[in-house]
Image (spheres, rainbow, N blue to C red):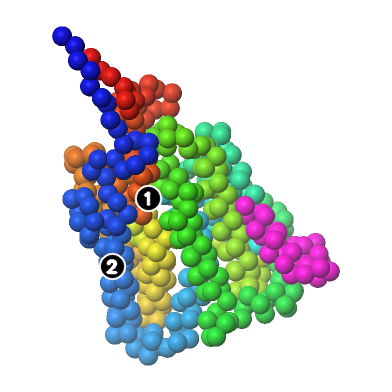
Amino acid sequence: MTGSTTATTGAAAGTSPGSATNDGGSGGGGIMAGPIGRNLGLVVGLAILCAVGLITAGDRFADIDNVLTILRLAAVIGVVSIGMTFVIIGGGIDLSVGALVALSSVWATTLATQAMAEDFHWIVMVFTALVVGAGAGLVNGIVIAYGRLVAFIATLAMLVSARGLAEIIANRRTQIVQDRDFLSFFSGDVLGVPTLVIIWALVSLAGWVLLNRTTFGRHTFAVGGNAEAARLAGIRVQRHTLKLYVLSGLTCGIAAVMIMARTTTGSSTHGTLYELDAIAAVVIGGTLLIGGRGTIVGTVFGVLIFQTLRNVFTLNNLSSSAQAVATGVIIVLAVLLQMRLAEGRGGFPWLGGRSSPTSSGEGGPTGAPSGAVSGGSAVPGAPGGDRPGGTTT
């Protein structure tokens, strides 16, 4: 005897059964497992660091000039971290960001570029840095999305190549920025707030809007959560991945302009270890390294926490080695906390917990593709299983 049943699935459009919404209020972890709880934890962590700074360094830490110094130093890596956030949420990684900052700064400060800027306007230097950063990101995206090379390997190769090309262009020399108008514009302030900090704030705001209020952001969460489900839902995964790496390269170009203004130089040594700092800030901010979940606000707090920590260490004359150890401990604790929160919402399969929907990441939009089609496979080209409305006997 046979009978027909209707197969239902939430894979394409709409929230899958049991998946969390934006506010993080559903799911086993409750509100503290959502973005509000994680961001509150970051605020508490930053407050504790500030309290330690006040206790150990007193007025030196609380001085307004010291606060502005923290913000200036955080601004450059903060812009890079915004681009890194998009890439990691989308399920990728970019190890080349520091080298792209160096390459963009060198290319924008060559004698030819500065001569053009002198004849026309210093905006030529800015445009050059942005084009070089975005162009290198485009190469990363093509190799990863269409060449199907693992992101770790592709961006590692770009790291080495871009740093080497920067050394060749600069002939291993530091190039001095000659345009006074360029320096005065980016090194100035508005109502006491440094221009570099304002640029970081604007980039962060634009990143937040792009991630949380646009189709591009929803697609980013979907691709990072389950690329095959996103493909079945009609998202052009390869093209979107390409755009993510171009965006990351563009933020590197912006950061290059900022570091040129701050140091008055273009150098192949700029951006050293920025990739590690950016990844650390993004992870501390609550973005999952496996993709599909993350917030811009969390990344901003992550950058501030690391820069404040460094400032406290410097004011107390502690060695950079001790600072490196503390940074490593913080990263490990942050990842362990992420895993714990994930377990509260269903757990990672390899930890023995219940499997949670791929789109249950906070910051992800309701209605994003939340998993493979019922009965389907996450392997590209594999059978997709029953479709909505299908019948089984």
Instruction: Give neighbour class at mark 1: few <14, some 14-19, many 20+ (Cα, 10 Å).
Output: many
- View extreme (bottom): residue: 59
Q: Circle 1 is placed at which residue position? A: 365
Front residue of 333/314: it is 333
| Residue 40 disc label | 2
Front residue of 272/307: it is 307
Is residue 112 part of the magenta span, yes or no?
Answer: yes
Tag 2: amino acid: Leu
Look at 43% across and 27% down and name the residue there: 380
Q: Is residue 91 visible?
A: no
| Residue 230 disc label | none
Q: Quadrant of residue 7?
A: top left
| Relative horizontal placement of residue 273, taking residue 9 as reference (left or right) | right
Picture layout, residue 374 above or below residue 40: above
Q: CA distance from mark 2 to mark 1?
A: 20 Å
**Helix, strand or loop for the magenta stretch, by majority:** helix
Look at 61% across and 59% down and name the residue there: 253
Q: Is residue 390 visible?
A: yes
Magenta segment, which residues? 107-134
Picture layout, residue 310 above or below residue 10: below
| Relative horizontal placement of residue 222, taking residue 201 as reference (left or right) | left
Picture layout, residue 156 above or below residue 316: above
Which secondary structure, mark 1?
loop
Picture layout, residue 181 above or below residue 296: below
Q: Quadrant of the C terminus?
A: top left
The percent coordinates of residue 178 (x first, y second) are: 74, 74
Q: Quadrant of residue 279?
A: bottom left
Which secondary structure, mark 2?
helix
- View extreme (left): residue: 1
